[in-house]
Amino acid sequence: MLFLAKAALGMAVALALSAAYVFHEGVIKVDVDEFKGDGSHIHLWVPATAVNLGLEVVPHRNLERAARQVQPFLPALRELAKELKKYPNAQLVDVKDQNEHVQIALVDGKIQIDVVDPQEIIHVRVPVATLEDVADRLESNASTI
């Protein structure tokens, strides 16, 4: 009986450490609600670590092609990610008209994009650190070109 308790405790600790590692970079959140007749309702939460893992399994030639296409913008993306870390909470864009509202802000170290119009509501949150990770990965592939 004592052996089963120790095994269960070991599995619980391993699960807790695995969850802590997976979610240590934060969560990417995408919510889309369409109000058309047969509109979609998508609510997706993905650990930001999944982006890094996804970049590991992308074929090298595809990553090189993407790096080549964005290479002129990589220094700006890198600098943007570095500067955004200095402002964990800031309003970047807020545009309203009669029917639509678009807002881009930094909230608790995440880029938050909100779009509200009569047809749909879209909310996207991405940790700033994820932008930096993607820029690093693309830059390392751009340097091999």
Image: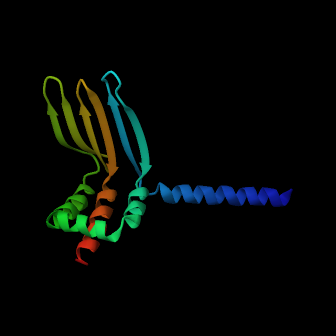
- Is residue 108 in view from this perspective? no
User: From what the image shows, is residue 27 above or below residue 41?
Assistant: below
At 24% across and 67% down in the image, what residue appears? 65
Front one among 91 and 138: 138
In this rendering, position of residue 50 left or right of residue 67: right
Q: Is residue 82 left or right of residue 96?
A: right
Q: From where the camera sits, is residue 15 visible?
A: yes
Residue 34 placement (x, y as % from top left) = 32, 28
Q: Position of residue 102 (x, y in %)?
A: 20, 35
Residue found farthest to the right: 1
Q: Quadrant of the N terminus?
A: bottom right
User: Which residue is the extreme one toward the top?
Assistant: 37
In which quadrant of the rendered view does residue 5 lie? bottom right
Q: Position of residue 113 (x, y in %)?
A: 26, 41
* Residue 13: % across, % down: 65, 58
Residue located 17% across and 37% down the image: 94
> Which quarter of the figure has residue 93?
top left
| Front-most of residues 41 and 129 | 41
Q: Residue at x 30, y 35 (%)?
A: 122
The residue at 23%/77% (across/down) is 143
